[in-house]
Amino acid sequence: MTPFPWLTLLTFVPVVGAVVVLLFGRRGARPIAIGFAVLSLLVTLVLWRGFNHASGDLQFVETHAWIPSLGVQYHLGIDGLSLLMLILSAIVTLIGMAASASIEKRVPSYYALVLLLQACLFGTFTAVNFIHWFLFWELALVPAFFLIALWGGERAKPAAMQFLVYTMVGSVAMLLTFLALYFSTHTFEFAELARLTQSGQLMPVVNAALGGHWITAPHLAALLFAGAFLGFAVKVPAYPFHTWLPAAYSEAPSGTTAILTGAMSKMGLFGFARILLPVFWPEMQRFATMLLWIGVATIVLSAFAALAQKDLKRIFAYSSINHLGFCLLAIFAVARFSGSGALADEQYAAMNGVFLQMFNHGLTAATLFWFMAMLEQRSGGRRGLDDFGGLRKIMPVFAGLMGISVFSSLGLPGLNGFPGEFLLFKGTFPLATWSTALALLGLLATALFLLRILQRVFSGPLNPRWATMPDLSTRERVLLVPSIALMFVLGLYPQLILVFVNSTAIHLVQGLHL
Amino acid sequence: MNIDYRLLALLARPEIILAVTALIVLALDLSILRKSSTGMRFAVASLLGSAGCLAAIFSLTAMTAQQSLLDGVLLTDPTIRFVQIAILALSIITLLLASQGTFTSNIGELVLLILLATAGMLFLVATQDLLIIFLSLETLSLSLYIMAAFHKPSARSAKASLQYFLFGGMSAAFLLFGFSLLYGLSNSTNLLQISASIHTPLNPMLIVAIVMTLIGLGFKVAAAPLHFWAPGVYQDAPTASAAFIASGSKVASFFVFFQVMCLGFAGAEGATGIAHFVSGWVPALALMALVSMVLGNLVAIVQTTLRRLIAWSAIAHAGYILLAIVAHTPRNLGPLLYYIVTYALGTLGIFTVLQAVEGDTGSDSLACYNGLSRRAPFLSACLSVFLLSLAGIPPLAGFFAKFYLFVSVIAAHPGSKSMLWLVIIAIAMSAVSLYYYLRVMKRMYVAEPDEDAQPLAPQMFLKVLAGLLAAAIVLLGCAPHLLLRWIPGAQ
Amino acid sequence: MLAWTIYISFLGAFAMALLPKRGAAGPRIVALLAAIASCGLALTSFIQNRTGEMLTVTDVAWIPSLGIRYHLAADGISLTLGVLTGIVAVAGVLFSWNIDNRPREFFAFYLLLVGAVYGVFLANDLFLLFVFYEIAIIPKYFLIAIWGSTRREYGAMKLVLYSFVGSAMVLIGLIAAYVVSGAHTLSLSALAAHPFPQHFQMWAFPLVFVGFAVLAGMWPLHTWAPTGHVAAPTAASMLLAGVVMKLGAYGCLRVAMTLFPLGLAPWSHHVLGFASWREVFALIAVIGIIYGAVVALVQKDFKFVIGYSSVSHMGFILLGLMTLNQLGLSGAVLQMFSHGIIAGLLFAVVGRMVYARTHTRELSELGPMALNKALPFAAITFVIAGIASMGLPGFSGFVAELMILIGTWHAYPVFALCVGFGIIAGVAYVWRAMQKAFFSSNAATVPHHAHEPLPPISLPERLGAVLLIASSVIVGIFPQILLNVITPALNGPLLDGLRNGRWP
C-alpha cells in the first residue's frame, strides 16, 4: 500500500488556498487565508506526530518518475531539520498573516501571494534533489518580490529589485555548480552526491568530466564550491552579500518581513546545513579560515551596524543578520573539523545549536516584526528609534510582551533564545576558539542595541504625541499568546525540539568523514 | 495526290461549323437585328456564336480515332482534340465577355472575327504541315489585328492595332522565310520529314531557319525579345479583344510552338550546359525564356495600370511555359497544356473584372482598385483568386500548374544543371511576381477608397462569369486531376 | 477526426461571409467557437494517443499522375504542436475581442491562417505540406497590412516575401527530391526511407533547411521577424511568433532533417574551419541566440524587445535540433511548445493590454505611467510571462532550455557556454523591459492619466492570460505530458536515417 503523500499535500494546500483567496476573496480574504494557514499547520503537526525521532534517515519519502530523460525523480523526504523548518514555516506564516492586519489595498492578492510563498517554503524544505529544490527556491522569489514591491514603503521598488538581483545572481551561480556536478555524476540527488563525497569520489569524477588543461583539480573544486556557496550565502545572508537585506526588510510591510526573516532566511541556512555541508565539506575544510572570518564579520559588523541605525525595522534587520551569523559560524566550525572524527560531541552540540537557533530565531524575529507591525499601525507608519518614548506608561501589555520578545532575542535564560545560543557556543568554542571569542563582541553589541530599543521606545518620558496610543486589544493579546507561550516553553523545555533533531544532527555530522 | 474529301470534311467539321455560324451571325446582324439595341445585338450574336462553338465541341467529342489527312496536313488525335476543345471553351467565354461590351456597333463583324479566328486556331493545332501552320497563323493573326482596332473612336486602339499589325506582319515574314528555308533543306513541308532531314553538324541554313522560326513563333506568344507589342495591345485594345488575344490565341500558339520545335526540329536541339554547349535551338529558346521571365517580372513591378501589369506578367508566364518546350520531351506537353489552359482561365477572369471596373469608373489605372473590397466585395474576391493563381499560391490552379511544369522540366533531364538553374530562376521570379500581384490585392483590401470613388454596381452577368471562373480555378487547384485526366499522356 | 481541426477553421473562415456586415459580436463568437472546437479536437487526440505512434488521419489518392496523396497523419510531435496551435488560437481570439474595424475579415483571415497551420502539422505528404505552408502566407499579409500598427504595409510585405522566398527554396528541394528518387511519390515516409545519394543530400539539405529556417527566424535571415511582429496586431503577433515561426522549425525537423539526414554528415575536408553543415547551423543558431538577446537589450520599443527575444528563443530550438541527440531534440520540440505559449503571452501583454490602452510602446514613455498601479493585472501577467521567458523553474521554458543545454553540452560543449550566456542575457532584457515599463523608478506617484484612467483589463483578456499561463505552468511542472509523446516520435521509423544509432 503506497503511503499517503503527506509532503505533496502539504505543499499543495497553500496553493489551493491562494487560488481560493483570489477567486472568492472579495470580502474575507484574510479569514480564508488564515484558515488555510492553520490547515497547513495542522498537516505539519500530523507529520510531527508520525515522525520517528530515533532515526536519522529521511522519512515520509515519496518517489515518482518525473523527467526520466534527465534522470530526475520527483523525490521528497524530510528529516528532523526539515520537519522543524516546516513547522517553523507554518507558524511564521500565521504570524506574518496576523501581522498584516493593516494591509488595505488589493487584499486578496496579498494573501494569495503569502500563501504561494508558504507553498514555496514547504517545497524547498521537502526537496531531496536539486531540481525540486531549485524550482521552489526560484519560485519563492516571485511572491517575495511582489510582496515587497507592491505593498512596501516609499523606496520599496529599488529594494525589491536589489533583493531579486542579488538572489538571482546567487541562484545562477548555484545552478551552474549543480549543473556541472550533474554533467559529471549524472545525478541531481543530494544523497547521492553526499555519498560520493563520503567515498572521496566526487571531485575525481568531476575532474575527469570537466577538468583538463584549462583548470587544475583543486581549482575546479574551489570554483564549484564557490558557486554553491554564493547561492546560499546571498540568502542567509552572509557578509559581504548582505547589503540587500536591510533595505528589503525595512521597506517590506512588516507582515511580509516577519515571513522573510522567519522562514525565508532559513532556506539559506538549510542549504548550508543540508546541502553544502554534506557535499562540499572537504572544500569547506580547505577554506575554513576564510569562512570563519566571514562568519565573524557577519556577526560583528552587523551588530555594530545595528547600533548605528535609527530606524527600528532596520535595527531588527541587522539583528537578523547577526543572529544567523552565529548559525553560519557554527556550521563553518563543524566543517573545520569534519573528516577527522575529533571533537565529535562538540560538533553534535554545535549542530543541534544551529537547528535550535534556526527555529527559535525564526519564531522570535517573526514575533518582533509582528510587534513592529502593530506599532506602525498605531503610529501611522512612523518607526524611528527616537520617535517614541515612555510607551510603557500607556501600553504596558504591549511593552511587556515586546520586552519578552526582545529579551528572547538577546538570549536571556528562560526564554527560547538561550538554549540555542548556549548549545551553539558550547559546541563552537572548542571547534573555533578565536572566532567564537571575537563573536562575543557581536553579542555585546546586540545586547546594547536591543536594550537601547527598550529604553528609547518604552522607557523615559512619554512622548506627548502618542499619549492616546491604544494598548493591545483583547484580540491581539489572544493572538499573541501562542507565540509568547512558545517562547517560554521552548526556553524552559528545549527538549521538545531537541528530541527529534538530535538524531538528524548526529547523522549529519557522522556523514562528514570519509 | 488523292484527297479524301470525306476525311477532310470529317476532320474539318468543327471549323466548318464555326464558319457557318459566323456567316449566320453576320447575316442576322446585318439584316434582322439592324435596328435593335447594341445590347440585344451583342447578346444574340454572342449566344449564337457560343452555340456554334458548343456544337463544334460536341462534334469533337464525337470523334474518337486518330486520323491524318495527306500525311499530316490535317490530323486529329486525342491531344489535338483536347486543345481544340479548350480553345473553343475559351472562345465561348470570350464571346460571353464580349457580349457586355459597348465599344462598337459592328457587332456581327466582331463575332465573325472571333469565330473565324477560332477556326484558324483549330486548324493551327490540327496540322503538322508548314503551309497550313502559316495559313492558320495568319488567319488567326489578321483577325486579331482587326479586333484590336475595333474601338473606332479610340486613337490609341488604332495605334496599338497598327503596331501589332506591323510587328506581326514582320514576324510572319520571318516565319515564312524560315519555313521556305526548311522546305529547301528537306524538300517537304511536313514537320516529321523535316526533322528526318536534320543531321549534325547543323547546316548553317538550318540555323538561320531555326532563328527565324523562333522569331515568328516567339512573337505570337509574346516572349522577350519579341514582346514589344504586348503592353500596347493589352492596354489599348477593347477588353474582349485583349482577352481573346491573351487567352485562346496563347493556347494555340504555345501548342504549335511545342509541335514545331519538338517535332519539326527534333534533331537540332543542342544542349545548354556551360561546359558542354552544343549549338541548337534549345539554348536559344532557353535564353528567350530566361529573358522573358526576368524582364517580364521586373518591369511588371513598376506598372501603374492593371492591363499593362497583366501584359508584362503574360511575358513572364510565357517565359515559364517556354521552359516546357526547352525540356523538349513528350511528357512536357501535358504540363504545358495544363499551365496554359489554367493561365488562360485566370486571365479571362481578370479581364472580366477589368471590364466591370472599367465600365463603372472608365479607367483601369491601379488607383481605381483602391478599397475595391469595400465597394465590390465579390469582384475583389474573384480578382484575388485570379491574381493569386497567377502568382502560384496553393490551393489554386496556378500553383499546381507551376509545380507540375517544374517537376516535368527537371524530370525530363534529371542530371542537367542548366535545367535546374532555369527552374530555380523561374521559382525565384515567381517570388518576385507575388510582390506585384500582392500590391494589387493590397490596394483592394488594405488601401482606403479614394474620396470620389463611388460604389460599383457591376452587372450580374459579369459577376456570375467571374464567379464561375474563380470557382473553376479553385476547383482545378484542389482537384487537378479533373483536368489532367482529359489531357492525354498526362497520367 | 483530427483533420476536422483544419476543416472547422476553414469553414469558420468562410462562414464569416454569411455574417452581417456590421457588428463585431457575430464574427467574434464564430471565431471563438471554431478555435475552441479545433483546440478541443487537438487536445482529445493528444490525450487519446498516449503511445505517440504515428496515427493516420486521412489517406486518399489526390493527383495520381504525380503520385500525390492527400495524406494526413500525426505523431507525437505533430500532436504537441497541434495542441499548441489550438491553445494559442483560442487565446488569440480572446485577445482580439476588441477589434471593431472590419471584424469579419479579420477573423476570416485569422481562421484561414490557423487552419493552414494545422494542415502543415498534420500533413504527411510533402506536396500537401507545401500547399498548407503556402496557404498560410497570404492571410499573414492581410492581417498585418490592414490591422497592424507601425509600418504595417512594409512589415507585411517583407514578412510575406521572406516567407515566400523561403518556401521557394523548399520547393526546389522538394522537386529535386521527387525527381531524383524516381519513386513517383511525395509521401514523407516513402521519401524518408529512400536512400538519396550523399552528394545530393549535401546540397539539398542546406537548401531545404535554410528555406524553412527563414520562417524560423534564423540569423541572418531573421530581419523580417522583428519588423513583422511589431507591425502585426496582437492576435497576429501571437500566432506569428507563437506558432508560425514553429512551422519553420517543424519543417526543418520534419522535412530537411528527415529526408536528408546525410546532409549533416561530416565533410571530407574542412571549409573555413567547419566540418559539416551541422556545425555551420549550430554556430548560426548560437549567434542568433546571442544576437537576438543583445539587440533586445537595447530596444526602446517594448514590442521590439519581445520581437528580438523571439529570434533569440528560436535560436535555442535550432541549436537543439543540431545537437542530434535525444535530449537536445526533445528539448527543441518542448521549447517549440513552451516558447509558443510564452511568446503569445508576451505579445498579448505588450500589444493588447498595454499598447491598446496607452497607444505607445516606447519604454521611456511607459515608465512614468506607473502601469503597475494602473494596470496591475497586466503587470503581473507580464512578470509571470517574463519569468517564464527567462526560464524560471516551474514554467515550461526551464525544462526545455535545460534539456537543450545538456544536449548541447554533449554535442558541442563550447556552444553550451554560449547558451548559458544567452540565458543570462535573456534574463537581462526581460528584466530591463519589465522594470522600465511597469516598475520604473521615475513613475509619477500620481499616474499620468489620473483624470482619464486606463480601461481595466477585460474578461476575455483575463481568460486568455490564464489559459496561456496555466498551459506553461502545467507543462513546466509535468513536462512528461509532452515528453511521453515526443520521445516515441523521435524514436519512430521516420527518423531512422537521422538517428543512425545515435540514440536512444
Image: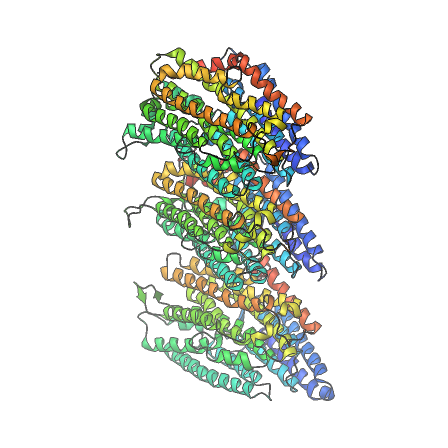
User: Outermost residue, front direction?
Assistant: A461
Pick whichever, C269 or B53, lies toward us.
C269
For the point 38% across and 76% down, the residue is B211
For the point 29% across and 63% down, the residue is B275
Residue C239, position as x, y percentages in the image: 56, 51
Pick whichever, C58 or B120, lies toward us.
C58
The way the protein has been coloured in the rendering is: rainbow
User: Outermost residue, left direction?
Assistant: A213
How many dots with numbers? 0
| C441 is higher (above) or lower (below) than C160 | above
Pick whichever, C225 or B321, lies toward us.
C225
Residue A104, position as x, y percentages in the image: 64, 39
Residue C411 located left or right of residue C163: left
Residue C147, position as x, y percentages in the image: 59, 60
Residue A107 located left or right of residue A428: right
| B381 is higher (above) or lower (below) than B103 | above
Q: Is residue C469 visible?
A: yes
Among the 4 quarters of the image, the one containing residue B92:
bottom right
| B486 is higher (above) or lower (below) than A353 | below
Residue B21 located left or right of residue C128: right
Residue C246, position as x, y percentages in the image: 50, 48
Pick whichever, C108 or B348, lies toward us.
C108
Q: Is residue A79 visible?
A: no
For the point 69% across and 78% down, the residue is B48
Residue A26 located left or right of residue A158: right
